[in-house]
Image (cartoon, rainbow, N blue to C red):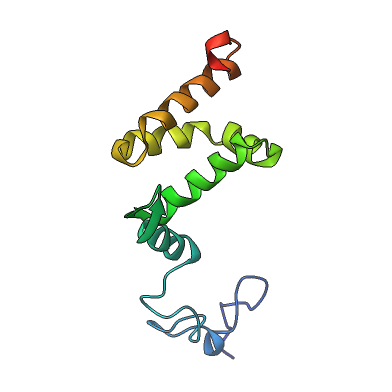
Amino acid sequence: MKKNKYTVGYGKPPKHSRFKPGQSGNPKGRPKGARGLGALLDEELKQSIPVTEGGRTRKLRKLSVIVKAVLAKAMKGDARALQFIVNHSATLKELTAAHPDELEAQDHMLIAAYERRRLGKSTDDDL
């Protein structure tokens, strides 16, 4: 009688039920070319939309519009918006460096004053 050298057990399925070469373990899984949530969100945030500021209409990226809205809320005293800015100030610095023309001089002054107050270097000029 011929002895079988292959034993079936944990991590060793029977040979007849293994995946064949080139066969996927999940044939109805993610289709090729499908993108994840992060890629879709990045694409949407990079799109430009028309925005009216001070009677003038210009195109801004959606991400810039969101940043401006959060900054406006923080300046009005919204504690959650202010906390968001504090937590993401490094990202805000990158955004202002990447698109300096999208923020006006007054915006830069407000950000600089906020950073001075946050670091404890407050002066009367900041108020």
Q: Quick check: 16 left or right of 107?
A: right
Report x, y in % for residue 85. 57, 36
Report x, y in % for residue 21. 39, 82
Picture layout, residue 28 above or below residue 41: below
Q: Quick check: 18 left or right of 11?
A: left
Query: Residue placed at 67% from the left, 75% from the top?
Result: 9
The foreground one among 57 and 77 is 57
Residue 48, by quadrant, is bottom left
Query: Residue placed at 49% from the left, 26% from the top?
Result: 110
Query: Residue placed at 52% from the left, 83% from the top?
Result: 18
The foreground one among 79 and 105 is 105
The residue sitting at the left extreme is: 101
Q: Quadrant of the C terminus?
A: top right
The foreground one among 87 and 39 is 87
Residue 20, by quadrant, is bottom left
Report x, y in % for residue 123. 56, 8
Q: Quadrant of the N terminus?
A: bottom right
Query: Residue placed at 70% from the left, 37% from the top?
Result: 79
Picture layout, residue 75 above or below residue 114: below
The residue sitting at the right extreme is: 79
Report x, y in % for residue 49. 37, 61
Q: Quick check: 26 left or right of 31?
A: right
Q: How many labels does the image show?
A: 0
